[in-house]
Image: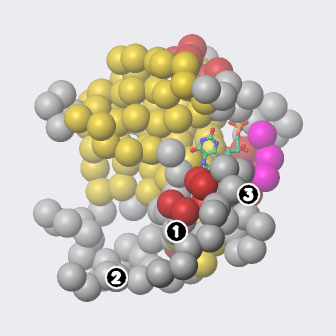
Amino acid sequence: MLRKTVGKDRVHRLFYPVVPVLITSKADSRVGCMPAISCTPMSFNPLLIGVSISPSHSTHKIIEKSEHFAVNWLNHVHASKVAYMAEVSGREVADKISASGLTVEEGRASPTAIIKEAAAVIECAVKERHSIGDHDLFVGECLVAYAEEDFEDYWLFRKYVPMLYVGSERTVFRRKYVALKS
Ligand SMILES: Cc1cc2nc3c(=O)[nH]c(=O)nc-3n(C[C@H](O)[C@H](O)[C@H](O)COP(=O)(O)O)c2cc1C
């Protein structure tokens, strides 16, 4: 098979499509919220979640201060609101979440903010922060996780239909997911 060389400025796009999450955090009265694709489980025991965030983002500063963050999954119907969260920074719009049409709620087990409309949430306490190139990797220990009834041992996808991020230059979000059959 003939494969063409992919430029290093395009390599991250080989990972697409990706289900983006919203990372939220709260310090004092400031609430941070940003979409992230660099978020993944890193250890089962202890249960550690990693998210890689640029220090230029206002959410980064809020997580540093609060030492807590939450991971929020939203149904595809909220795709345009998630896209909005990436278009503006908390530096410019103080209450990004309300401005997007979503709702902020208190976390269940930590002093953090979560998204009321989220299909699932993980609340984390930051255990480690590593500087990795132009991003910082926050490693958070899961304090509590909750999901709507469409999640049993796995997602059933009866109600929750994830959004897929396919890259900003072409289509920002596609509204359907494709199930891969093994
Ligand atoms: C789908 C998507 C995923 C993103 N993933 C990340 C990510 O994993 N890490 C990161 O630092 N920025 C990521 N970004 C960029 C931030 O979400 C964006 O710059 C945001 O506006 C930062 O907001 P803030 O300054 O209010 O924190 C992503 C953007 C999009 C559209």
Q: Which mark is residue 84?
A: 3
Identified by mark 3, the residue type is: Tyr
Measured as percent of width and height from the top left, residue 115 is found at 51, 49
Kindly report the distance in space between the C-alpha atoms of the residues bearing marks 3 and 1.
19 Å
Amino acid type of the residue tagged 1 in the rendering: Pro
Residue stretch in magenta = 85-89
Kind of residue indicated by mark 2: Ala
Helix, strand or loop for disc 3: helix
What residue is at 64 percent from the left and 61 percent from the top? 6
Q: Dot 3, crowdedness within 10 Å: few (<14), some or many (≥20)? A: some
Q: Kindly tell me whether residue 29 is visible in this rendering.
A: no
Assess disc 2: are there few (<14), some (14-19) or many (≥20) residues with their C-alpha within 10 Å of its C-alpha.
Answer: few
- Quarter containing ligand 1? top right
Mark 1 near mark 2, Cβ–Cβ under 8 Å? no
Q: Residue 147: give x, y in percent of width and height.
A: 29, 57
Q: Which residue is mark 1?
A: 17
Q: CA distance from mark 1 to mark 2?
A: 12 Å
- Residue holding disc 2: 179
Classify the position of the C terminus by image quarter: bottom left
Residue situated in front as seen by the camera: 90 or 114: 90
Q: Choose the circle earlier in sequence order: 3 or 2.
A: 3
Q: Which of labels 3 and 1 is toward the front?
A: 1
Separation of residues labelled 3 and 2 (CA atoms): 27 Å
Instruction: Please tell me whether residue 139 is drawn above or below residue 82 in the rendered image.
Output: above
Task: Identify which residue is drawn at 24% across, 76% down.
Answer: 156
Number of marks = 3
For residue 86: magenta? yes
Work out whether mark 3 precedes mark 1 in sequence or the reverse, and give the earlier one.
1
- Tell me which label, 1 or 2, sits earlier in the chain: 1
- Which quadrant of the structure image shows residue 123? top left
Describe residue 64's horizontal placement relative to residue 162 as left or right: right
